[in-house]
Image (spheres, rainbow, N blue to C red):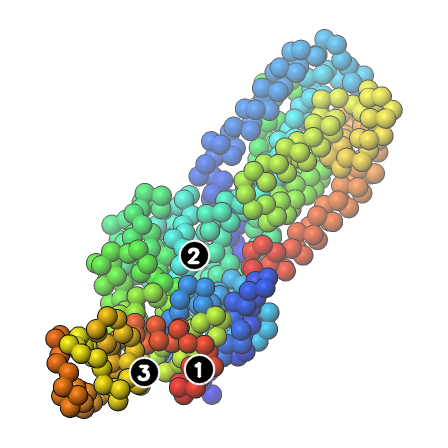
Amino acid sequence: MSSFYSLLHKEMFRVWKVGFQTLLAPVLTALLYLLIFSHVLSQHIEVYPGVHYTAFLVPGLAMMSVLQNAFANSSSSLIQSKITGNIVFVLLAPIAYWEFFAAYVLASMLRGLVVGVGVYVAALWFVQPPLQFPMWIILFAVLGSAMLSSLGVVAGLWAEKFDQLAGFQNFIIMPLTFLSGIFYSIHSLPPFWQMLSRFNPFFYMIDGFRYGFFGVSDISPWTSLMIVSGCMLGITLLSLRLLKSGYKLRH
Amino acid sequence: MTHPAIEVHQARKHYGAIKALDGVNLRIEQGEFFGLLGPNGAGKTTLINLLAGLALPDGGRLSVLGHDVVKEYRASRRLLGMVPQELVFDPFFTVRETLRLQSGFFGLRHNDAWIDEVMYHLDLTAKANTNMRRLSGGMKRRVLVAQALVHKPPVIVLDEPTAGVDVELRQSLWRFIQQLNRDGHTVLLTTHYLEEAEALCTRIAMLKCGQIVALDSTQNLLANLTGYRVWLKLAGSLPATLLKQVVKRTEGSYLLTLPSYHALELVLAELRLAGVAIQEMRLQQPDLEEVFLSLVGRTSSEAKHVKLL
């Protein structure tokens, strides 16, 4: 287990060493979204009755930050290590594939969650969203960050070049995030797009997470919980399987 | 029962259609200083990667001190310290942080006494708190060696550790590795520098196209294969009786093999008898380069024929 702790420590140490870029920058980005969108849209939209648009926006932005940073961390750490070649130091050590997985995923979850909390705390300057059911908030934040960290491991293993990883990020992660209802309720969409949104696992993460704040959601949080858990489990298993086989690591 | 430091049985590995290793057998005893030689693409690095678990074998078995590198990878990796060929480093950390993390990967905490000792021997102490990015190539190479040694592995594998390294480091590195070898560590070395292998290794294996084409003590390799050679520039043509000794001929000059110094007299006698005058003459000492070239120029079956295996 001590090898696992060391790898976890290394991954967290890495985040901390470039904390300006890994922790502060994403909080600032989310705040800019909040300022601009709430300024432009708050007069026009009331998504849930009695909920100010700026308040509505905060959980979505916090969750978006959690997901993006969890993904970015494991995927970029892996591809950097692969391309620079220093992954060899981990591969030479007596570390089991599941320890490898757990260390990368936990460190990435932690980064995602720290950024998410940072976004929430910074947003408190502008608006104080309610905290109806904190347990749902924590549950969805943990599940969502775990799923995206695992997905980051898969992407980091698969990609051989930085632009392949950027492609994964730009053509899969970004569209799924932006079309998940961060900025709107899917009930405001035309039926076709509403139906399409239901195939997006990110939608359930955001919707369930937001339920924890307002006690209102587009669909039942239990349904979201099942779908998000299922997706997380599937990606975790895929990721573990790739690691066990040595996919693109131990040729 | 004591296990060999390294045992390789029928190791096979292919990359696509290329057979990187084609049924290699090798046994290295504890305490040996063993050299693995061969041209680029012969399979040296593949063999080492299989031993270290960086690649998985397609067939055969490999073990480190009796522990299978696939089934008992935790035990085998704890016993093996490997210096990779590429100059790799983690740009986020300082030298000391790098060595502490590497110790941690091997389950060692509070390893600073040994880390300090390794840094001292490799002349890294002054750079302990310098970020890896700021080190010169030679210094990075030293850190790689230090990283391979953090867990005091009984078996040390060095994959061309002195490629592109200045003379000073090369010497201090070998002093340190030889010291470790005297203390009982087994050393497996691949190198392109034949004089290095000649000076350091007690036994040598030569790989070609994924197969071992020679395996013997360094002494025997030098003695059996090359013998001495004499280069002659003659006024006339070489007597027919000497033709079978010719290795190479150019305009008016010949390179002949000599089983011993004594054979030189016979050559001279033949020349005198034929009335051919010698214009120039040079004796050549045997070295591994010769062995190497003569072996890699042959096919493996021919090499077996010279009874090296």
Chain under callout 2: B
Q: Are marks 3 and 2 in contact (CB under 8 Å)?
A: no
Q: Nearer the viewer, mark 3 or mark 2?
A: 3
Of labels 1 and 2, earlier in sequence is 2
Of labels 1 and 3, earlier in sequence is 3
Q: Nearer the viewer, residue A42 or B160?
A: B160
Q: Up-down: is B2 above or below A200? A: below
**Residue B240 located left or right of residue A69:** left
The answer to which quarter of the image holds residue A180 is: top right
Q: Residue at x 60, y 53 (%)?
A: A101
Chain under callout 1: B
What is the three-letter code of the residue carrying label 3? Leu
What is the three-letter code of the residue carrying label 1? Glu
Specify few, some or many for label 2: CA neighbours under 10 Å numbering under 14, 14-19, or 20 or more. many
Chain under callout 3: B
Specify few, some or many for label 3: CA neighbours under 10 Å numbering under 14, 14-19, or 20 or more. some
Q: Residue at x 74, y 49 (%)?
A: A234
Q: Which label number is shown at residue B102?
A: 2
Q: CA distance from mark 1 to mark 3?
A: 13 Å
What is the three-letter code of the residue carrying label 2? Gln
Picture coordinates of residue A65, whole percent (x, y)? 62, 31
**Residue B119 located left or right of residue B59:** left
Q: Residue at x 57, y 24 (%)?
A: A29
**Residue B169 located left or right of residue B89:** left
Both marks 1 and 3 on one chain: yes
Q: Up-down: is A125 above or below B126? A: above
Q: Residue at x 82, y 26 (%)?
A: A193
The answer to which quarter of the image holds residue A246 is: bottom right
